Amino acid sequence: MDTLAERDRKILKFVSDKNIVGQSDLASFFGVSDSEGITNHMRTIIDGKYVSIIRPLGQTSFTLTQKGIRALK
């Protein structure tokens, strides 16, 4: 089983609470203003496939995968 840092668990919980999270939501959560900063904060959970990147209407957003849901339980 993968071990996630507390920060990563908080991110997953944030995404879980909203179902779909846009980059602007994450920018506020992290206190950053650019997509590179968001990606740096999310690298572990993106690479670990805990979230999926989706692009509704062309805007990059994130949603939990089944693996992400299991990690929160």
Image (cartoon, rainbow, N blue to C red):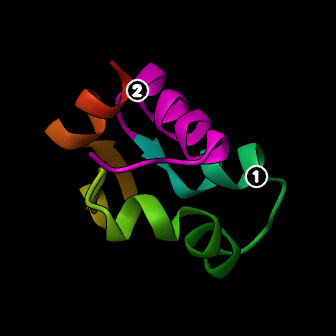
The answer to whether residue 8 is left or right of residue 1 is right
Residue to which mark 2 is pinned:
16
Of the pair 71 and 63, the residue shown nearer to us: 71
Q: Which mark is residue 15?
A: none
Residue 16: within the magenta? yes
The question of residue 2 being in magenta is answered with yes
Q: Is residue 51 left or right of residue 23?
A: left
Q: Secondary structure at mark 1?
A: helix
Residue displayed at 61% across by 34% down = 10
For label 2, count other residues whose C-alpha is less than 10 Å away and answer few (under 14), some (14-19) or many (20+). Answer: some
Q: Amino acid at mark 2?
A: Ser
Q: Amino acid at mark 1?
A: Phe
Q: Which residues are magenta?
A: 1-20
Q: Is 43 placed above or below 56 here? A: below
Secondary structure mainly formed by the magenta segment: helix
User: How far apart are the two marked residues, 2 and 1, measured between alpha carbons?
Assistant: 16 Å
Q: Is residue 43 left or right of residue 51?
A: right
Q: Which residue is mark 1?
A: 30
Where does residue 70 sit, x and y in percent of width and height?
24, 29
* Residue at image point 50% right, 71% down: 43
Residue in the picture at 31% in, 51% down: 51
Residue at disc 2, secondary structure: helix
The residue nearer to you, when weighing 71 against 14, is: 71
Mark 1, Cα crowd under 10 Å, few <14 / some 14-19 / many 20+, is some
The answer to whether residue 7 is visible is yes
Q: Is residue 59 visible?
A: no
**Do the residues under discs 2 and 1 have CB atoms within 8 angstroms?**
no
